[in-house]
Amino acid sequence: MQRAAELLRSATKAVVIGHIRPDADAIGSIGGMIIGLEKLGIPCQGLIGQTTPIPDNMLSIPRAETISCTETLPEADLVVIVDCGSIDRTGALAQQVAAHPNTLVLDHHASNTGFGNHNVVAKVESTTSLIAELFEEMGIELDVELAHALYAGLVTDTGSFRWGTSRMHLLAAKLMDTGLNVRIIGEELMDNTTVRDTRRIGAVLANLRTYTVGDIKVGVLVANHGVISTCSDAAVESLVDAVRALDGVELGVVLKENDPDIWSVSLRSTSMNVANIAVKLGGGGHIPAAGYTARGDRDRVLKELLANL
Ligand code: 5GP
Ligand code: MN
């Protein structure tokens, strides 16, 4: 942490990169880093290594609107990578990041490979929790904008404070005391949806299938490309909550066809280590929540997953 603080303080121009297909912890971590470095007078550009824009619901996070979705790494003397368990999560920027001599990884994934020149990987609820701790050590003061960005990662990565240690509540209290309107933040990030999306998501839920492998029961939801390209990202991401804790089902799976025959696979379990399964299939994540990318038609992707349990 001390080394990380020194690196941040001595930067003259920084970039901060979050993972592709960003969630609120990635965007909140980028927003938080930008605001923290602004307070030190250090210019910092936020980046996501993809050309697809950031999901609408995340634009409510401070500085999200300034993040550039790009395949080119701008010149900088420090590259901070947040919420990425492995370098491929920086997407189109991966090779340029690998070649940079001064990279700092701030992350909380169990599967983190330590791919930076400097790595701070902590077992905490969110990457924004780690950044909050780092900023506190550095004497960077919280204000309502910084607190908003950090809270966004905390509230979503803890499933709205349903998992994590008491530390998450202590941090939430500190953040709320800056004057956050947590009700509006939660609505903007997680609840806002449309009648059309709700009906489409309902159709996906109605097609829930279960499979049995040995003594493991698996629940699977499939959002094909038609669904993905017509529903908001937030609506699609909400699907995983429906398979997280199905009675009698050990493993919940959501297959999301982001491009034809290219699938983001989300794994959730309360009894199995899904990070291990995801790593085996080229992805990563946390013990109860992990994911990977797969190619092929739906049946092939499902068969490959079931064969690897
Ligand atoms: P989600 O299912 O919500 O997309 O992701 C759950 C967890 O798995 C997150 O911590 C996320 O970072 C990780 N994850 C999801 N997809 C991938 C992937 O394609 N590669 C890696 N390395 N991790 C992933
Ligand atoms: Mn995270």
Image: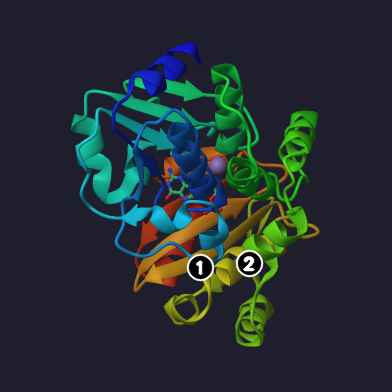
User: Is residue 59 positioned above or below 129 on the image?
Assistant: below
Which residue lies under the disc numbered 1? 56
Indicate the amino acid at tag 1.
Asp
Q: Nearer the viewer, residue 160 or 226?
A: 160
- How far apart are labels 2 and 1 at the CA level? 17 Å
Residue at 55%, 36% (x, y): give it.
127
- Write down the quadrant of residue 128 in the picture: top right
* Earlier residue among tags 2 and 1: 1
Answer whether residue 16 is visible to the viewer in this image: yes
Residue at 50%, 34% (x, y): give it.
36
The image shows residue 232 at horizontal and vertical percentages of 53, 74
Mark 2, secondary structure of its residue: helix
Q: Which mark is residue 146?
A: none
Circles 2 and 1, Cβ within 8 Å, touching? The answer is no
Q: Nearer the viewer, residue 140 or 186?
A: 140
Which residue lies under the disc numbered 2? 239
Q: Nearer the viewer, residue 304 or 234?
A: 234
Q: Is residue 246 left or right of residue 6?
A: right
Indicate the amino acid at tag 2.
Leu
